[in-house]
Amino acid sequence: MGRYLARRLLQFIPVVIGTMFLLHYITTLGIQFNGDPVRALFGDRPPPDAVLASIRDRYGLDDPCLQQPGNPCIGLFIDRIGEYLRGDFGTSIRFTDRPITELVAERAPVTIRLTIIAVVFETIVGILIGTMAALRKDGFVDNSVRIVTTLLVSTPIFVFGVLVQVFGALALRSWLLGIDAPLWLSDMFSPVYNVANPWLSLIVPGIVLGAFSLASIARLTRTSLIENLRADYVRTARAKGLPARRTIGVHALRNSLIPVVTYIGIDIGVLMGGAVVTETIFGIPGIGQLVLLSVRGQDALVIIAVVTMLVLVFLVANLIVDVLYAVLDPRIRYD
Amino acid sequence: MTESTDFAMEPDPRTEPPESPEQQKREINRSLWADGWRELRSKPQFWLSVVWVLIVSSMAVFPSLWTSGDPLDNCLLEQGSEGPSAAHPFGFTYQGCDMWGSVVYGTSKSLAVALLATVMTTGFGMLIGVLAGFYPGMVDTVLSRFTDIFFGLPFLLGAVVFLAIVPERNVLTIAMVIALLGWTTIARIMRGSVLTTKNRDFVEAARGLGATNGRIIRRHILPNSMAPIIVLTTINLGVYVGLEATLTFLGVGFQRPNTTWGLLIAEGQPYAMQGDAHLLLIPCAFLVVTVLAFILLGDMLRDALDPRGR
């Protein structure tokens, strides 16, 4: 185990630096080819050059290498890593000079709440319907689950989100308002985020965000549970006379959930992309919306800082999942 | 089944209908592909998906076969958002263009992006995967870490960021951004597949006979690693059609005056909220059915090419 951990950590460091460099290089190329974001800020009525120069100087955009297309700006990259390590992520140009850390701190709780709802929904419902499908293989439930999950996987998240918003939430809400249902119930189906209901109005977006992964988790659970139900140890447990609840619930299901745990690592990346879409559709002021707003406003400093933070979260989550996998499955660590 | 391995000599009485020994021998010598084809052609979903893919591809290549003229040529604002009628069964877009014509003309860009991105991901992914699997040690370590670096960027997030800096968004640049982030899965699968094939006896035999590395890769490793790649490539076609529409919806893909399904959906959303449901439902239906067709094809190919399933 110690050797596995050490090896995995040693691989982790170059990958983190590599991914950060990739991001840095791509955004640098963007500035070099498209002109710098300060000029874009003023459109076709640029202020005097002296003003532009002083703004560039303030945001660290005056480095001469930003004028040389193709130059990887290694010096700038090293400076930036140093600033990030000291906790200085720079300031936003668009959002009236606010420190990026402040913007992120303000928006992160919303996205975290959204993600919690999505993850709770997708794991509980996914494992439940996956188990039901596996126990009645080729039965009615199994076939319905297969059809529904295939449909969910084939529906891009923005299509699902827009359809749920227009034909699900909106229609249900007006119906609930019509029959004088309790207010909290109709608030739950609000088609847009409402600051007054920080959890309730995130339930529908959370379900949309988790729907794609729900399908994957249900399928993974089903396949691996079917495989395990045929295994010798389950037969032995049955032969010993253990009740079905225990053979399935404790012996088979627990082993079947190992692939589900590893899926959560990949899932973090899926959820991050999905959050950009879900937050845009439902008008949720979270990190995903911040990324899209900065992309549309060409705020290069915010893009690179926020995406770097997200990538770090993704990579660390994957590292934890890999370690967890080795803890759960001894075959990995003795490899 | 009996323990005997030579079924041709000793027909199992339970198999019906009875066949001549010669016929049975042919049955046993069927390749993985022939076996897969036999399974596929008996499935109605397979033919449905194939027919839909052919329809959509013909819309992309010859839109005039399906509708008369570019929909943008005869739009009347006073017809805007009109619902379905006998002459126009899919109604009109909010700009008053024929919806059916817009959907047909919207096909080509999406499919072109998906096809181009798939060709690029498969080509580059296979190259990196084969090299990493075939040359262990330094080459493998460097290429695997290189793959990890690109894998470290979440797909949709990375695509949004990269498209933000692309000066002009067209079929080529959108496909390139998708390919830049998408090749890693193919590379990883290819590497694993090469690692398992490399040590099989027939590769040793070929090496013993003096085959060069290039020949071993071309004639022995690649054909035996193809099955999972073909499955993933088919699924990717569908996923990329959906991804292009997603990026367009987010405003970092195609823009007007292009016509694509993603644009039709994005424009239809606010009007559907006010009650014109067809503006949203029709382009969504075309998009979802197309993605579904490719994903179903991929799933069925996987089942058909996996000998464990039988």
Image (cartoon, coloured by chain):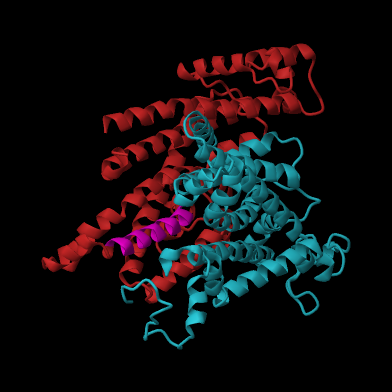
- Is A220 part of what is drawn in magenta? yes
In the rendered image, the quadrant that contains the C terminus of chain A is top left
Q: Nearer the viewer, residue A114 or A237?
A: A237
Q: Nearer the viewer, residue B203 or B181?
A: B203
Residue A49 percent coordinates (x, y): 78, 14
Residue at 63% over, 26% down: A25
Residue at 49% over, 20% down: A84
Q: Is residue B168 visible?
A: yes
| Horizontal relation, residue B95 to residue A308: left or right | right
Return the residue found at the far bottom: B17
Residue at 38% over, 59% down: A126
Please tell me whether residue B189 is drawn above or below residue B71 in the rendered image: above
Please tell me whether residue B155 is drawn above or below residue A135 in the rendered image: above
Residue at 41% over, 64% down: B308
| Horizontal relation, residue B254 to residue A72: left or right | right
Question: Color of chain B here?
Answer: cyan
Q: Hey, which quadrant is residue A289 in on the image? A: top right
- Is A83 part of what is drawn in magenta? no
Please tell me whether residue B291 is drawn above or below residue A99 in the rendered image: below
Main SS of residues in magenta: helix
Question: Color of chain A here?
Answer: red
Q: Hey, which quadrant is residue A216 in on the image? A: bottom left
Residue B244 percent coordinates (x, y): 66, 51
Residue B272 percent coordinates (x, y): 65, 62
Q: Nearer the viewer, residue A76 or A102?
A: A76
In the rendered image, the quadrant that contains the N terminus of chain A is top left
Q: Which segment is the magenta one?
A: A210-228
Q: Is residue A168 visible?
A: no
Q: Say how many tags the image has.
A: 0
Residue B218 percent coordinates (x, y): 61, 48
Q: Nearer the viewer, residue A335 or A275?
A: A335
